[in-house]
Image (cartoon, helix red, strand yellow):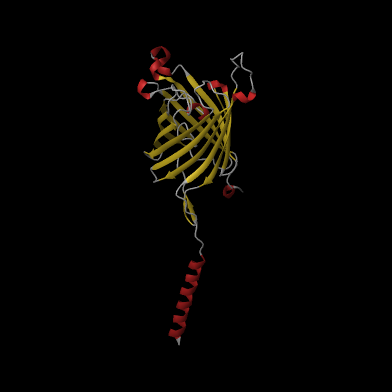
Amino acid sequence: MLTFFVSSFRLTGQEDLMDLIGDTKPTTEYTYATFKSTRISLGQSVENPPEGNLIFDVQHHFGPANIGFNDFFGLDQAITRLGLQYGITNWLAVGIGRSTLEKTVNGWVKIKLLRQSTGEVNSPVSVSYFGDAALSTLKWADPVRTNYFSSRLSYASQVLIARKLSNALSVQLSPTYIHRNLVEKTTDDNDVLALGAGGRVKLNNRVSLNVEYYYVLSAQTAKDYNNSLTLGFDIETGGHVFQLFFTNSQGIIEEHFIPKTTGKWLNGDIHFGFNISRNFVLKKPKEFQD
């Protein structure tokens, strides 16, 4: 009799355990830190500021190194941009900034459409949309042409598709559409299609090697414009991310460096540049709130 009750208890316990296992819902594991910054180097990455986080950006491109010692190999010349970006939610971010090139003010929005994940939701890639509008505030230089406000506007739209292949390697493709209401040269198209490709190789816990290239489809821009190529490093130190790089692009925002890069790497038209990002937590995540 005792043996019967013990056996029944064991059987009932096993059945209850199996019921609990059966009732367990599958979970979704999301991939984090595909890139260290919201930019790979020049172009946008799929990363957003976390919800409630404000990021202050300082972006700086020196002049081309081949101009010689008189301008200290480009260090006497500089294009800068100051900007802010804010995470409204973990899926939605907005930003604004001003660049000294053409005295351009720009505002943008970035939306996470899909996150790389495994489990209940299985997605091999992360996908984001980036949209930007830019306004040139330069003094109007053409006395013959009417100074329309719309002539100063340009736009950029991108679909960012990234995959973190391992803890040390991430890649991204960035199909891009640029529209300029007014172009500088008759050989320029108002609409430009380009394809960006970038990657990150993690060297250690704080340093990574980045590469980024934008191919502009042929016959859309003047012949003296070239594709943008950037090589650089990310260095993470606490609340700061330093990005140091070399590029043939003088411009900083997408409407400038994608369709209007004039430098050639083989001719020494290389600009040294850096990005500094400082993160401020304005709103604590819910799990840390009192």
* 275 lies above or below 168: above
* 156 lies above or below 90: above
- 96 and 237: which one is in front? 96
User: Where is residue 165 shown, x and y percent of the image?
Assistant: 40, 46
Q: Name the residue rendered at 50%, 35% in the picture.
A: 176
Q: Is residue 169 left or right of residue 157?
A: left
- 277 and 151: which one is in front? 151
User: Where is residue 279 shown, x and y percent of the image?
Assistant: 53, 36
Q: Is residue 218 left or right of residue 113?
A: left
Q: Name the residue rendered at 42%, 36% in the picture.
A: 198
| Residue farthest top in this picture | 70
- 248 and 34: which one is in front? 248
The N terminus is located in which quarter?
bottom left
Q: Answer yes or no: is residue 239 visible.
A: no
Q: Answer yes or no: is residue 255 visible.
A: yes
User: Where is residue 280 shown, x and y percent of the image?
Assistant: 56, 36
| Residue farthest bottom in this picture | 1
Q: Name the residue rendered at 44%, 40% in the picture.
A: 172
- 246 and 192: which one is in front? 192
Question: Across the whole image, how many numbered discs are drawn on residues?
Answer: 0
- Residue 224 falls in image quadrant: top left
